[in-house]
Image (cartoon, helix red, strand yellow):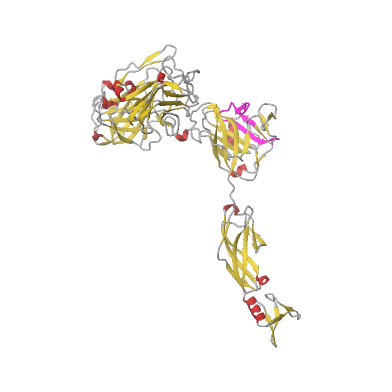
């Protein structure tokens, strides 16, 4: 979303308003998280890692939304990153209008290179500067950002408007030194890059700076190792591996006086890659929960061996009183730190932190998963099956064959890349038996060589196919054959391939089994890599879902009809989905009657009961039970059946009536549907018992 907010005394305001007057400040973030911006001309790509718009074309135009110019804005700035080639420069043009065709320029902001595409510098300019025929914008108009024709483009992070004009005191000229004695300068007049807080003398009384030698290694105060040793330039060196440095003196935070942390860093070498795991954390007093006050990411790709750059974050919590300041590195690569500054009322663009959804996860598989473990040793002894180093056997149960792009290392399938294909089968090469219970997830445990974001799951993944060679052998060196086989088959499961930050950083990621039927019974399994890089697989864990017990519910009021002593009881039922199409047995008073198979989760079924077998009284109680495999006990319903014939006979018996069959044999329990002689006193009649 676009954000309009008030900053307390920004740098531009400080140039002419040192008394603390507030400056109205309007800022639009240009990244994929902002739904209010739109590319209306040209091309660009949103970088999800660095939160910017990059790969832009020279004819790019972005609609930043509507701005009310009657609020009195006087200057504009752009947060941009413009490569590391020599002497590249250009200008960002801001225009205002109801649409792009009618928009007229109101700000022309020149920029220069700074040896990085992923860490912004802030460049500012007053409205109308160097624009012929300038007319000040008024009212509510859309703002469009584009580039000066025939000049360089730049990655865009955001655009801001301020109500206080810039002066010469706000700017700086940069000169940079690269290795092998090459020195490049911007060759620019003043009016290019805006000063950082720690570069601006006007901020001297707005903060405190702790130099590198003002810290000591918490775990090695006497500096017996190189970790945290001060380099010749005064910076903290030999960093990483959870190094923790503490300030030798305490800092008085007053009554929540400081609101930003600025860390001057020198963090990369030529060609350094993006690593999502590289963070510097700032604590007070000790590294403990609740004590962290700041966090910056330093894993962006940038080359600046001889150039220190500031990384900025806002304080995460209010801090009062005197405290030691601690800076802590992670364990996935270091960066030199020249100093740590705490500032008040010197708001500056915070260093972007990638979306948390991009960070490497580490999902732990469940204990009873089916495991294909590629780690050698222990119970997972490995031997060559084919003698070619490509086919391996584990526990005499299964084997994995590398079909395309890869080879075996001591504890993983390595040397992989986009298009790697692995095959898992039974040890003798036949289909592997995955059992009858469906799987829900697969956890892949693997490592990668760097921490670069690989993209969403559709761009970077492991896909699991079955039985690709059922219709004939595939020449795995023939990409057309391989692609044809994959396109004509649905995968059974997919797991996103993330970056773990190094070959030694094994992490797990869980993916869904999208077609469970393909992973039941006997199949040959194929694992296919899709990514811009490889991954060393350590193990695969196939997880079955938690067992879902079948359930049956019976209607409380069955319908009952009686005919010739046979009661028909119509029972309504509701069964769980896993019982549809499965056998359900019916019992009466614990005695099996018959089996039926439900075609849907709801329905009715007729249960016949011979009521003559329980003719003790006129109201007989029966228990009907429904039972299925997997249930602990049957579902039951009780019914009471009235039989008028039985009741009449019992009443007759109570009054002295006796019954005889036609052979003259007396019966105490006449059967429904039969003819008897009824003797009552001196009277005999022939009766049909119903």
Q: How many marks?
A: 0
* Looking at the image, residue 687 lies above or below residue 434: below
* Looking at the image, residue 175 lies above or below residue 263: above
Q: Position of residue 684 (x, y in %)?
A: 70, 86
Q: Position of residue 332 (x, y in %)?
A: 50, 26
The N terminus lies in quadrant: top left
Closest to the observer, 146 or 553: 553
Closest to the observer, 479 or 115: 115
Q: Is residue 413 magenta?
A: yes
The C terminus lies in quadrant: bottom right
Q: Residue furthest top?
A: 181
Relative placement, left or right, of 67 versus 86 is left
Quadrant location of residue 469? Answer: top right
Is any part of residue 298 visible from this angle? no
- In the image, the segment drawn in magenta is 401-429
Task: Residue at 23% x, 29% y: name it.
Answer: 135
Quadrant location of residue 422? Answer: top right
Task: Residue at 69% x, 87% y: name it.
Answer: 681
Is any part of residue 541 visible from this angle? yes
Q: Is residue 389 magenta?
A: no
Q: Position of residue 143 (x, y in %)?
A: 30, 33
Relative placement, left or right, of 532 versus 658 is left
Closest to the observer, 578 or 421: 578
Task: Residue at 42% x, 11% y: name it.
Answer: 181
């Amino acid at each position: 979303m676009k954000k309009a907010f008030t900053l307390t005394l920004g740098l531009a305001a400080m140039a002419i308003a040192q008394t603390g007057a507030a400056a109205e400040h309007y800022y639009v973030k240009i990244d994929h998280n902002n739904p209010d911006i739109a590319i209306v001309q040209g091309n660009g790509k949103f970088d999800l890692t660095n939160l910017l718009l990059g790969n832009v074309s020279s004819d790019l135009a972005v609609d930043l939304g509507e701005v009310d110019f009657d609020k009195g804005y006087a200057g504009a700035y752009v947060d941009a990153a413009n490569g590391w080639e020599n002497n590249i420069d250009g200008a960002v043009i801001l225009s205002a209008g109801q649409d792009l065709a009618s928009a007229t320029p109101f700000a022309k902001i020149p920029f220069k290179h700074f040896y990085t595409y992923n860490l912004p510098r802030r460049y500012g300019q007053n409205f109308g500067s160097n624009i012929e025929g300038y007319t000040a914008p008024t009212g509510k108009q859309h703002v469009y950002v584009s580039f000066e024709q025939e000049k360089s483009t730049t990655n865009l992070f955001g655009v801001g408007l301020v109500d206080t004009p810039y002066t010469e005191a706000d700017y700086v000229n940069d000169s940079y030194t690269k290795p092998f004695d090459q020195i490049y300068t911007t060759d620019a007049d003043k009016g290019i890059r805006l000063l950082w807080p720690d570069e601006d003398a006007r901020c001297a009384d707005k903060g405190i700076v702790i130099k590198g030698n003002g810290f000591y290694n918490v775990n090695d105060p006497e500096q017996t190792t190189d970790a945290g040793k001060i380099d010749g330039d005064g910076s903290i060196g030999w960093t990483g591996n959870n190094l923790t440095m503490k300030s030798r003196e305490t800092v008085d935070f007053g009554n929540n006086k400081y609101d930003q942390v600025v860390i001057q860093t020198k963090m990369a070498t030529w060609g350094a890659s993006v690593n999502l795991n590289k963070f510097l954390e700032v604590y007070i007093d000790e590294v403990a929960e609740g004590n962290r006050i700041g966090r910056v990411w330093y894993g962006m790709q940038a080359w600046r061996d001889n150039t220190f750059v500031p990384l900025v974050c806002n304080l995460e919590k209010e801090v009062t009183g005197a405290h030691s300041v601690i800076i802590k590195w992670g364990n996935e690569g270091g960066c030199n730190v020249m100093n740590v500054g705490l500032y008040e009322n010197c708001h500056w663009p915070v260093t972007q932190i990638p979306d948390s959804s991009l960070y490497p996860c580490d999902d732990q598989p469940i204990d009873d998963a089916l495991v294909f473990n590629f780690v050698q040793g222990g119970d997972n002894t490995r031997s060559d099956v084919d003698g070619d180093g490509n086919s391996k056997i584990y526990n005499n149960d299964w084997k994995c064959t590398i079909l395309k792009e890869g080879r075996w290392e001591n504890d993983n399938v390595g040397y992989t890349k986009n298009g790697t294909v692995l095959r898992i089968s039974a040890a003798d090469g036949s289909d592997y038996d995955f059992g009858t219970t469906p799987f829900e997830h697969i956890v892949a445990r693997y490592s990668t060589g760097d921490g670069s974001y690989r993209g969403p799951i559709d761009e970077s993944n492991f896909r699991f196919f079955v039985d690709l060679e059922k219709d004939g052998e595939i020449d795995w060196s023939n990409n057309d054959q391989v692609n044809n086989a994959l396109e004509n088959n649905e995968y059974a499961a997919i797991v996103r391939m993330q970056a773990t930050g190094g070959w030694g950083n094994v992490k797990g990621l869980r993916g869904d089994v999208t077609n469970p039927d393909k992973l039941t019974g006997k199949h040959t399994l194929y694992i296919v890599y899709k990514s811009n890089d490889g991954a060393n697989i350590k193990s695969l864990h196939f997880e079955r879902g938690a067992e879902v017990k079948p359930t049956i519910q019976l209607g409380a009021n069955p319908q009952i009809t009686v005919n010739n002593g046979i009661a028909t009881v119509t029972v309504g039922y509701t069964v769980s989905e896993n019982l549809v199409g499965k056998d359900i047995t019916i019992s009466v008073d614990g005695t099996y009657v018959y089996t039926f198979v439900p075609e849907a989760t709801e329905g009715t079924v007729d249960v016949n009961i011979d009521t003559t077998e329980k003719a003790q009284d006129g109201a007989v109680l029966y228990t009907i039970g429904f039972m299925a495999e997997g249930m602990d006990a049957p579902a039951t319903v009780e019914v009471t059946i009235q039989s008028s014939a039985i009741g009449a006979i019992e009443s007759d018996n109570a009054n002295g009536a006796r019954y005889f069959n036609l052979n003259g044999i007396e019966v105490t329990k006449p059967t429904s549907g039969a003819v008897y002689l009824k003797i009552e006193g001196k009277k005999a009649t022939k009766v049909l018992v119903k």
